[in-house]
Amino acid sequence: MAENKIKECSKLIAQHGMTIAFAESATAGWLCSEFALTDESGQVLKGGIACYDADLKVSLLGVPKGLIDQFTPESMEVTKEMAYRLAHLIPSDIQVTVTGLTTPGGSETPEKPVGTMFVYALIHDRHLGFRKVFQGSCEEIIQQTIQATAEMLIRALTQFNYHQHISTGA
């Protein structure tokens, strides 16, 4: 099912003449890989960075260590900062970043249990994101995150199209 949403999302990105890039922690590149399997991949996909370990968020993406220390590697604050940093590393129209807890051993707490996922996206000057708690195995949590991310992007791109038509009078 996630594959169909990814295909729909990829088609919308292509219709807008846009490109997309990823920096993924908890999903470890799976989201980017799903886009690589679409017919429009050559048009829309710029690339992705898998930065599963918190040290890579600092050394590769340039996320301040103090931000990670303050909020944990799996947080909306860090996920948002990753998106801003990604925009400088992989120029694209859309930057999508993911952190979260798919297995025990991270920064889980009663308020942030395993299954908590953070997604943030920049589409030009628009900022989108969500924090959701998913249930299931590691694989099921990742699949649900991919689905929810595709749905978020589809909604945003559909609204983007809607606003374009309104502003041009079409």
Image (spheres, rainbow, N blue to C red):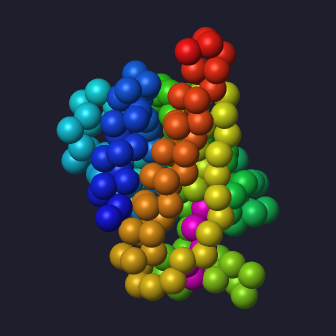
| Direction front: furthest residue | 170
Q: Most prominent secondary structure in the magenta stretch?
A: strand
Task: Please say if 140 is above or below 12.
Answer: below
Left or right of 66 in this view: 27: left
| Direction right: furthest residue | 70
Q: Where, quadrant-wise, is the N terminus in this rendering?
A: bottom left
Task: Please say if 53 is above or below 115.
Answer: above
Q: Where, quadrant-wise, is the C terminus in this rendering?
A: top right
Magenta run includes residue 5: no
Q: Residue 20, how many percent across, how many down?
A: 43, 35
Left or right of 5 in this view: 104: right
Residue 86, visible in the rendered structure: no
Task: Please say if 1 is above or below 157.
Answer: below
Magenta region? 114-118
- Please tell me which residue lies in front, 63 or 77: 77
Magenta run includes residue 115: yes
Residue in the picture at 61% in, 12% down: 168
Residue in the picture at 65% in, 45% down: 128
Task: Please say if 137 is above or below 151.
Answer: below
Residue in the picture at 57% in, 82% down: 114
- Please tell me which residue lies in front, 55 or 147: 147
Q: Residue 106, how many percent across, how many down?
A: 58, 77
Q: Quadrant of residue 117?
A: bottom right
Residue 159, visible in the rendered structure: yes
Q: Residue 37, how many percent across, how many down?
A: 22, 47
- Please tell me which residue lies in front, 78 or 144: 144
